[in-house]
Amino acid sequence: MFHTNFNAMLAKSTSVLAQTDYQNGLSRLGYVVIGLLLLTPIISLLLYSYVASQRAARAKLITDALKPLHQISLFDLASRLNRPDLDQLWRELWDLQRSGQLMGFNIDEERKVLERPIPPDPWTCAACGASNDGRDAPLLCASCDSPRANCS
């Protein structure tokens, strides 16, 4: 809100300034300064969209690294993303979660783990007929350790 109001006031004041200075005779440098002031809202909008797209790209890298897993440690995530600075990665994860880019992910600060909770999905094993709730090991049967891909 403030950003939009500020840009509107800036544009209005520079247009008034341009009209009065045009009547009095303004140097070329003055016209360059006024032009830059008039372009400030456009430049700030482009900069904001660039930063937002970069943040979305970083979030996509992290979610793609976590796709096959339901949790990953900070060290494993750093090695997958080729990021040596763990503190910077940790701050970036918190910023992305606060901004809503990592929705559905939990950050466990004590264990230094990023996890995606998997909702329970009950299924029946075709090999042994056991009923699985899908919470503990959603991809393996609790009784015979058969992969879920072979089950219905």
Image (cartoon, helix red, strand yellow):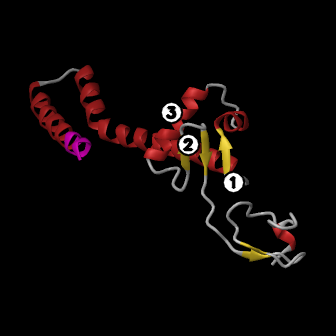
The residues bearing labels 3 and 2 have C-alpha atoms spaced at a distance of 13 Å
Q: Is residue 84 magenta?
A: no
Q: Is residue 4 magenta?
A: yes
Q: Nearer the viewer, mark 2 or mark 1?
A: 2
Q: Nearer the viewer, residue 134 or 101?
A: 134
- Specify the amino acid type for callout 2: Asp
The earlier-in-sequence mark between 2 and 1 is 1
Q: Residue at x 69, y 46 (%)?
A: 65
Q: Which mark is residue 67?
A: 1
Residue annotated with mark 2: 108
Residue 68 image point, x, y percent:
73, 54
Q: Which mark is residue 121?
A: none
- Specify the amino acid type for callout 3: Arg
Q: Nearer the viewer, mark 3 or mark 2?
A: 2
Secondary structure under badge 3?
Answer: helix
Residue annotated with mark 3: 91
